[in-house]
Image (cartoon, rainbow, N blue to C red):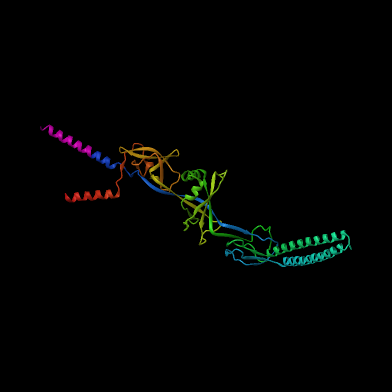
Amino acid sequence: MKILFPIAIALLACCATSCATKSTKEKEAPEYPTLTVDLTDRTLMSDYAASVTGRQTVEIRPQIDGLLTDILVRDGAPVRIGQVLFEIDPAQFQAAYDIAEANVLSAEAAVSTAQLVLDSNTELYQEEVISEFELNTAKNELAEAKAKLKLAKAELEKAATNLSYTQVKSPVNGVASMIPYRVGALVGPNITSPLVTVSDDNEVYAYFSMSENSLLDLISQYGSRSSAMEKMPEVEFRMSNGDLYPHKGRIDAVSGTINNSTGAVTFRAVFPNPDRWLRDGGTGSVIIPQTYEQCIVIPQSATYELQDRKFVYKVIDGKASSAEVTVLPQSNGKEYLVTSGLEEGDVIVSEGAGLIKEGTVVNPKAKPEAASETAEADQTKSEQS
């Protein structure tokens, strides 16, 4: 008995040492946050670089040559349709109009005279005083006088049109651009820069491009291109300073052709612009929301890449097992939407996937709430002891 007792004590000490070592190893095993895959709804926002144009942008150029005598609009001022913006020296055109008007009066007098001659010759011919040749000559002179009158009236109309062109008017409502000319400048139809550009920006168009594959995905989702235009949700616009434009818009047009060099399709979104925040020639990006229902969403930190393929680590029997996943190309920068490779209920490592190897023992990291509860329980036990 004296011999067996020391042996028993040694065995008990060995077991205690082994258990302590095992417990120490478990405590020293690194902890990894995990999550259980479930189904959820998610809306993704896709940004597309866009250029802004007014609903109608018109370059205003003079129709005649002449000197600018007055500028009646300020740079950047709002203008109305029919408003006089510039005046060109009318002297020569007024003179041409007066001459044309006088020619019309002269031609009308000539027609009246020719008509009197014809009436007189007709009576004389009936009395056999003059020959048929003289009667026909009178008829031809009347026809010639009427032709000259018609020509004179056309010249008068042309002169009146040219005179009206001395007042350059706005053909649309909108906002004027900067004016590169000053009073006294010689202008004409062939000037390089327009007198002014007027942009109707009560509504603005944002043009952007989307890949052919994205267009086909939209058509597949909504059934047809026309249905996509009708059913697509409202879009947003991010201005060049990074702020979101306060008014939402809609996609109202898509190009019927694909750019051969880029393989992209042009879309047009229209936005209301009551406060004139957006201007013709501006830039920004169109934000298109797309909602996915009952989908698998995982954090990007749960994935790692290998040869352009994405993988995650599933936790199976307490160990990490790599699994390839397929995700949508669109993302919100923090999460991926998984289309294959995971199922509801799978447990994966949610962070630090790039630091784990196949077969690594995964010790799930306790949630802050659970850790707090455990600490409180330990403290209670200690107090009871």
30 is higher (above) or lower (below) than 57: above
Magenta region, residue range: 1-19
Residue 185 seen by the camera: no
Q: Position of residue 341 (x, y in %)?
A: 39, 39
Q: Position of residue 309 (x, y in %)?
A: 43, 39
Q: Residue at x 33, y 39 (%)?
A: 315
Q: Is residue 197 magenta?
A: no
Q: Residue at x 22, y 37 (%)?
A: 18
Residue sitting nearer the eye, 156 or 385: 156
**In the shown orientation, is residue 301 left or right of residue 158?**
left
Q: Is residue 9 magenta?
A: yes
Q: Position of residue 51 (x, y in %)?
A: 54, 53
Quadrant in which residue 81 is drawn: bottom right
Q: Position of residue 359 (x, y in %)?
A: 34, 36
In the picture as drawn, the residue positioned furthest to the left comes out as 1
294 is higher (above) or lower (below) than 85: above
Count up the numbered dots.
0
**In the shown orientation, is residue 367 left or right of residue 135?**
left
**In the shown orientation, is residue 374 left or right of residue 61?**
left
> Main SS type for the magenta part?
helix
Of the 4 image quadrants, the one containing the N terminus is top left
Residue sitting nearer the eye, 311 or 13: 311
Residue 116 seen by the camera: yes
